[in-house]
Image (cartoon, rainbow, N blue to C red):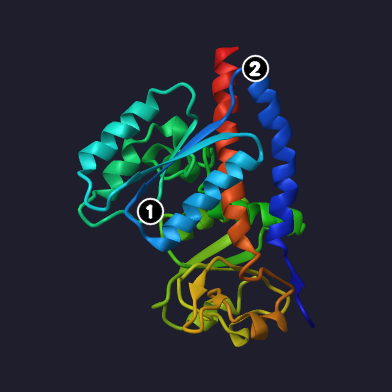
Amino acid sequence: MTAQIIDGKALAEELRQGFKARVEALTAKGHKPGLVVILVGADPASEVYVRNKVNGCLAIGMHSEKITYDAAVNPEIVLKKIAELNADPNIHGILVQLPLPRHFDEEAVLEAIAAEKDVDGFHAENVGALAQGNPRFIPCTPYGVMKMFEKGNVDLTGKEAVVIGRSNIVGKPMALLLINAGATVTVCNSRTKDLKFHTRRADILVAAVGKPKFVTGDMVKPGAVVIDVGINRLPDGKLCGDVDFASCLEVAGQITPVPGGVGPMTITMLLANTIEAAERKAALAD
C-alpha cells in the first residue's frame, strides 16, 4: 500500500484564491486587512519566514509591513511599538517573529499584543478560549492541519490521535483541536517511554518534535493519517520533516510531504486569521 499524499501547497493556493474576494469586500468598505510583522535580529530562517508572510499578504490585496530591530534592541522599544500598533485602527493583526533574543521576556511580548489582534493565537486569552472549545484565533500551524483533515475527508470523531510534541506553538494547541473534534488524544514527546506502543495505536499521528526522520515506518499503524509538522535541514542542505517519508509512505493511508505539506498552510492560516480579525472589526463598525 502506498499512502495518498496530502498536497498542502495546492490546498493553500486554493484557500488563498478564496481569500481574495473577502479582502476586496473589506477594502471596499474601508476595512482593508492589515498585518504587521515584527522581526528582532537577523536570524536567516526568521527573515525568510517574515518575507513569505509579508508577500503572502500583498499577493491577495492585504496591507502588510515588516518592522525590524537590531538583536540588541531594548525590549521596551519593541513593547512601545506594539502599544502603538494596538491603537492603530488600520492594523488588524500583529505578529512578533519567534524566537526572540535571550534578553527578551517572550511571554511579556506576546501578552502585550491586544488579544483581538493576536493572529498567531498565542495570547493567554486566546489560548484559554481554545481550551474551552470556543476559539477566537487558532495558532496557524495546527489550524492548517485541521484544514488538511477537512480537505482529506478525515473523520476525527472517536479516532485515536497521537501528537508527538508539546510546544505551545504546535503540540498543545494541536491536541486541543483534536480533543474538540471528538478524537481520543495522547500527547507524547521524544522521551516518552515505549513511544512506538502509542504511535502504533494512532489512527491520526502528528509529528511535531523537531528531530529529522524521527518517525519511521515501523512506528505507524497501517492506514493511519500521518501529519509531518517538522522542517529540518540536513547536512547536505536538503529539507526533511520529523517523519521518515520513504518508509512511512508504504504504511500510512494519507501522509504530508516536506516540503509542500504543512508549511504552506501555516502562512495561509495566518492570512485567514488576519482577514477574520478585520471582518470582526468591520462588523462592530457597521
How far from the left and from the top, in percent, is residue 11? 72, 54
Task: Indicate which disc, 1 or 2, sits on the residue closer to the N terminus.
Answer: 2
Q: Is residue 108 left or right of residue 95?
A: left
| CA gap, disc 1 and disc 2 | 33 Å
Q: Residue at x 49, y 57 (%)?
A: 48
Residue 183 shows in this picture: no
- At numbered mark 1, what does the secondary structure look like: helix, strand or loop? loop
The amino acid type of the residue labelled 1 equals Leu
Residue 29: which numbered mark, if any? 2
Residue at the spot of label 1:
98
The vertical placement of 84 against 252, above or below, is above
The amino acid type of the residue labelled 2 equals Lys
The vertical placement of 268 against 125, above or below, is below
Crowd around label 2: few <14 · some 14–19 · many ≥20 (10 Å):
few
Q: Is residue 85 left or right of residue 25?
A: left
How far from the left and from the top, in percent, is residue 268? 62, 48
Give residue 114's quadrant in the image. top left
How far from the left and from the top, in percent, is residue 21? 73, 32
The vertical placement of 20 against 163, above or below, is above
Task: Evaluate if marks 1 and 2 touch, with contact meaning CB atoms under 8 Å apart.
Answer: no
The vertical placement of 22 against 57, above or below, is above
Q: Residue at x 62, y 51 (%)?
A: 181
How far from the left and from the top, in percent, is residue 200? 60, 79
Q: Residue at x 62, y 54 (%)?
A: 265
- At numbered mark 2, what does the secondary structure look like: helix, strand or loop? loop
Q: Is residue 271 left or right of residue 113?
A: right
Quadrant location of the N terminus in the rendered image: bottom right
- Residue lying at the far top in this picture: please name it: 286
